Image (cartoon, coloured by chain):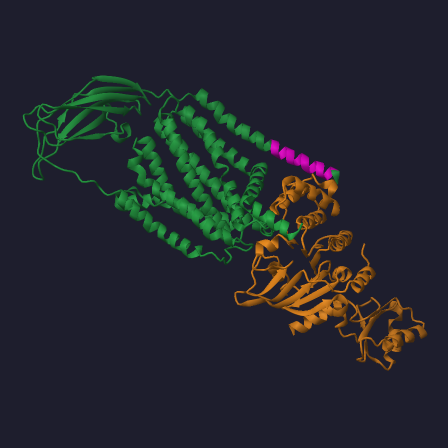
Chain colours: A green, B orange
Amino acid sequence: MSEAAIAHRGRMDRAGSWRLVLARELADLWLGGKALVLLTLFSILLGVTAYLMATNNELRLIPIKEIAYLMLKLTVAFGIFMSLIIGADSISGERERGTLEGLLLTPTSRRQIVIGKFLAALSPWPPAFVIAIPLIAVLCRDSQVVSWALLWGGILGTILVVGVTGLAMLVSFWSSSNRTSIAVSLIIYLVFLLPTQFPGQAQTGAFGDLLQKWNPLEASNVFLAKAIVNNRSVEEMASWLLAPILFAVLTLGLLFLYASPGLRLEPGRARTRANWGRAASFASIAWLPITLALSFAMTLPTAAATSSESPVQIAVDREWATARTGDEVEFTTLVTNAGSETSPPLIVAMNIINLQGEVVDPEDWSPQRTQSIEPLAAGASIEHTWTIDAILKGDYMVYMVVVPQPAGPESTSVPVASSGIHLTVTPFTRINPRGVLPLAVGIPLGLTASTALLRWRRRRAIAAGEGEA
Amino acid sequence: MISENDAAARRASDPVTQEPILEAEHLKKSYGGRPALRDLSFTLAPGRILGFLGPNGAGKTTSIRILTTILEPDEGHFAIAGISSRYPERIRARIGVLPESQGYPKEMTGIDYLVYFGQHYGWTSSEARQIGWALLEVVGLQHRARSLIGSYSRGMRQRLGIARALVNDPAVVFLDEPTLGLDPRGQQELLALIRRIARERGAAVILCSHLLSEIESVCDDVVILSVGQVVARGSVTEVIGQARGNGVRIQVPLSAVAEAEQVLEALPDVIRVVPKGQGSGWIQVELLDGAPEDNTANNAVLEALIQATIPILTFEAEGSRLQEVFLQLTEEAIR
C-alpha cells in the first residue's frame, strides 16, 4: 500500500476509528463474560432484595415510593460499581496484559482509542437498568410513582455512571498496575460516600446541606429520595442536580480534552501540543467553589411578609376514609374569612396523628403539608385539594389547621382546626410475591445460562483449535 | 534454514546503494536526568536487515520506542519513508512492529486479530480479511486461523505478531526479541521468515536480539549500543573486522592437552597458552600482535600440532565472531 493510499485511508477513517475500538472492547467485555458475570451478580442481588420486599413481614411495610427509591438506589449503586471496575481496568489492564502497545502503534489517534474504551465501559449500565425495570414495576404495581421514579433514576444513574466511568478511566490512565487503579478508584468512591456516614447533625444545617450538595453521589441520592418519596418537585430540588452534572462534565473534560491526547505506554500523560492542561487543572480546582457558589445561589431563602390576625374558619369535605397502604386519599378544605375585614396572610397545615399513639412523620404522608393563602377579603373563601399517601397500616386522625400570620413579634394569633378525618389504612397488599418470584429467579438464571453458554463455546473453540493443531 | 554462507553471500551482493528508508539523526533521551540514549544516528536502506544489539540497559528498547513513535526523543530527529518524526500518526501508518512484551487477546481468533488491526490502517473488513489470510499463510498459521489465540503456542503467537506487523505492508519492520522463548527449530523458522520479509517485500527490518549468532546469520548491518551510545555501526563484516584478532582457540582430546601445551609454548609467536573450561579440551593461545589479515602465526600453530600428531577437534581465530566483537566493544564502553 502506498503512502498516499494510506494517508487517504487515514483521513477517511480517522474520525470513525473509535468504533473499531468500541466493537473490540464490547466483544471483550461481553463475549469474554466479564460484563455478564457482573450483571448476573447484580440480578441475584436485586432479585433477592425484591423478593424480600415482597414477602418479608417487616420489609413489606415499606411504602411503595420508598421501595421504588431503594430499588433504584441499589441499581445506581451497582451501576457505579460496575463502571468503577470496568473503567479502572480499561487502560492499566491493557498495559498489564501487554495489549496497549499494539493499539498505540496503529495510526488511530489516542483520543479515538479512549472514546471507544469509554463507551464500552458504559455498556453494562443500560442492561443493568433494564433488569431493574420489571422488578420495580412489579413491586410497585399500579403505583403512579413507577414511571416518574424510573425516569429520574435513569437520568441520574446515567449522569453518575458517565462521571464515575470517566473518573475510573482517569485513575487507570495514571496507574502503573491494574490493582492500583481499582484500589484507588474504590478509595475515591469511599471518600464520596464518607460524608453520608457523618452523624445526623453534621448532615443538617448549612454546612451539612453544602456537604451533601457538592458530593455528586449524595446529592443524587437526596434528589431521588425527595423527588420520589417526598413528592418534591424537580424545580424545588434542581440545585441537587448540579453536583452530579458538574462531576460528569468535569471528568469527561479531563478525560477527553486533557488526558487522552497524551495516552502512552507508561502510566501518566505524555506532553502534547494542546494547551488543555492548564484549562483542565483550573477546571478541576474550580469545581468545588463553583458548585458551592451555585448551591448557595439556588438555596437563597425567599422573603415572606407578615401581617395582623383575623377570624377564619376551615372545613373539610370528608369525615372518614379507608385505604390500603400505597393508596392515595384526596380531600378538600374550604377556608372562609367570616370576619368583616380582610384577613392577614394565612397558612393551612395538615396534621396526622396515630390513634394508637405511634409516632407519625407527616412529611412522609403528603407532598404538601402546608399551603399559604394570600389575605382573604371579608366573606371570601378559598378551596384547596390535598393528597395523603397511605404509607403505613393503622388508625389515624387527619385534621387541618389554619393559622393567621401574627401582626408582629409581640403578638400572636389563634389557629383554627377543622374537624378530623378518620383514616383507616389496611395492610399492604399490593406487592404480589407471585409476580416477583419469576423475575427474581428468572433474570439471574437467564444471565447465568448466557454466561455458561459463552464459556462452553469458548472451551469448544479452544478444543477445536487444539484439534486442528 | 538459513546458513551463515547465505547471509555472507547476501551481504556481499547487496551493497548499500539505495536511498535510505530510515534516517535517524542524533536521537537523545533521558529519564529523570538519567541518559538512556546519548546519541543515536544511523541509516537503513530498503530490503536490508539491521541487527540492533546491546547489553541490558544499553538503550535498545528506548531507541525502538522512539523510532516507533511510542516515545518522543528529547533531542534529534528521524524520518521513515520520507515522513518526518513530527508526524507520528503518519509514521505509524508506514511501520510494522512486534514489541518485545506483546500481549494478545486470548478470546480472539488469529484471523479476527489481523482483521481488527487491518481496519485500524484503513482497510475495509473484507480487504483486511483477505490480507489477514494471505499473511497467515506467509507465517504458516493458515490452519489455525480460526482458533482462539488463547490456544496458540508461544511460537505461534510470535508468528501471529509478525503477521500483524505486516498488515499495513510497512516500509520498515521493527522486531524486538522475536525469537525469545522459542525452541531452536522455532528460532530457525522465524529467522527464515524474517529473511523472506526483507527479500520478498523489500521492507527494511530492524531486529533486536540478544542472540548474537542469529543476528550474525540473518543481518546485513548492525548497530551495537552500550550505555546509551553507539559503539559500532556498519555492515556485519565491517563490524566484525573492528575487533582485534590476536589469538586462537583450539580444542584437542582431553588426553592430549598437556602435550599440546608443551608444543605450543615452544613456538616463537606464542605469548601464552591457557587451558580453558576444565575437562573440555579447549586451549586458548595468545599470539603476538599482528595485522588481523596476517594468518602466519595461526598457520604455525596448526602446523606444530599436526607435526606432533595431536588431533585437532576445533580451531577458531579469536575476533572472527560477532559475539566476541560485541563483548569486546561493550566492555570497553563500560570501562
- Determine the image quadrant of residue A336: top left
Q: Position of residue A125 (x, y in %)?
A: 47, 36
The reply to whether the magenta stretch includes residue A459 is yes
Nearest the eye: A90 or A177: A90
Residue A402 falls left or right of residue A248: left
- Say above or below: A159 vs A421: below
- Determine the image quadrant of residue B233: bottom right
The reply to whether the magenta stretch includes residue B308 is no
- Say above or below: A367 vs B274: above
- Say above or below: A456 vs B261: above
Residue A188 falls left or right of residue B160: left
Q: Residue furthest left?
A: A340
Query: Residue at the spot x=58%, y=29% of the render?
Result: A449
Query: Residue at the spot x=44%, y=42% of the render?
Result: A162
Q: Position of residue A49 (x, y in %)?
A: 44, 30
Q: Position of residue A299 (x, y in %)?
A: 26, 42
Nearest the eye: A48 or A273: A273
The quadrant the N terminus of chain B occupies is bottom right
Would residue A305 be seen by someone viewing this image from the given angle?
yes
- Say above or below: A146 vs B217: above
Q: Residue furthest bottom?
A: B268
The quadrant the C terminus of chain B occupies is bottom right
Query: What stretch of residues is rendered in magenta?
Result: A453-467
